[in-house]
Each structure stands twice: as structure tokens, then as C-alpha cells.
Image (cartoon, grey):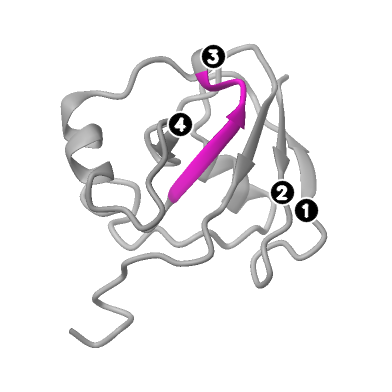
């Protein structure tokens, strides 16, 4: 099983973490299964950017994002060339290291 290394995030994972998840699992599902409460306002249906992560290592093992994910990522706060929506980033056989951005754009939570 691949390991996901999560870099420290002030509120979601202050000390960082290392978790294991089966190949074929989305990063979002793996985080939630290990009590790391990443936002996922659209319930992992690829309709928002709240589960955005930056993949620091292991990006190529996740497969290519599709056009819908790429279009959504254009709206994400802190976009980088290795950004992914964690609900769409499916684990391959390699370990990955991710960073959860400090901010998300969540209009429902912000009362818009």
C-alpha cells in the first residue's frame, strides 16, 4: 500500500502525518478515513475546489487529471503545476507527499 505523507497544516494536521491507503483510493478518501478533515464541499463529485492539494512528490503516479478537473483547478487558491483535486487524485503504487493549502474557496461556508 502506498504511503501519503501530509505536510503540516495549521488546523487540519498540525504535526503532519503519514498514512497508508490502498491503490485505487482517492487522496481525499484516504485523508477522511484517517480523520484528516479536508474540505470536500461537493462530496467528492468534482464540482468544487475545496479538496485542492499540492502534490510535492509522486505526482506522476496519480495519473493525468481530466479536463473537468483542470478547469476547476484554475479557480483554486494557491494553484501550482502539481495541484490536484484530492477527490480525483487516485493513488497508484508509489508513495506521495502532499501539502494542503492554507486557504480554500468555499462559498457555502463563507455565506455567499
Residue 59 appears in the figure? yes
The residue wearing badge 3 is: 61
Q: Please tell me which of labels 3 and 1 falls first in the chain.
A: 1
Q: Is residue 12 left or right of residue 51?
A: right
Gap between marks 1 and 2, in whole Å?
5 Å
Q: What's drawn in magenta, residue-wise?
A: 52-59
Secondary element at tag 1 = loop
The residue wearing badge 4 is: 82
Question: Nearest the camera: 48 or 101?
Answer: 101
Q: How many marks?
A: 4
Secondary element at tag 2 = loop
Q: Which one is closest to the eye, mark 4 or mark 3?
A: 4
- Whole-percent x and y of residue 35? 67, 58
The residue wearing badge 2 is: 7
Disc 3, disc 1: CB below 8 Å?
Answer: no
Residue 46 appears in the figure? no
Q: Which one is closest to the eye, mark 3 or mark 2?
A: 2
Question: Nearest the camera: 80 or 14?
Answer: 80
Disc 3, disc 2: CB below 8 Å?
Answer: no
Secondary element at tag 4 = loop
For the view shown, which residue lies furthest in the bottom direction? 111
- Whole-percent x and y of residue 51? 42, 52
The residue wearing badge 1 is: 16
Disc 1, disc 2: CB below 8 Å?
Answer: yes
Amino acid at each position: 500500500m502506498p504511503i501519503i505523507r501530509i505536510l503540516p497544516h495549521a488546523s487540519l494536521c498540525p504535526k503532519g502525518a503519514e498514512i497508508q491507503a490502498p491503490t485505487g483510493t482517492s487522496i481525499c478518501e484516504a485523508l477522511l478515513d484517517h480523520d484528516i478533515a479536508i474540505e470536500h464541499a461537493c462530496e467528492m463529485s468534482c464540482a468544487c475546489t475545496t479538496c485542492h492539494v499540492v502534490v510535492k512528490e509522486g505526482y506522476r503516479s496519480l495519473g493525468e487529471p481530466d479536463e473537468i478537473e483542470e478547469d476547476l483547478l484554475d479557480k483554486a487558491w494557491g494553484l501550482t503545476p502539481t495541484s490536484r483535486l484530492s477527490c480525483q487524485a487516485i493513488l497508484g503504487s508509489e508513495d506521495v507527499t502532499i501539502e494542503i493549502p492554507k486557504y480554500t474557496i468555499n462559498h457555502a461556508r463563507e455565506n455567499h
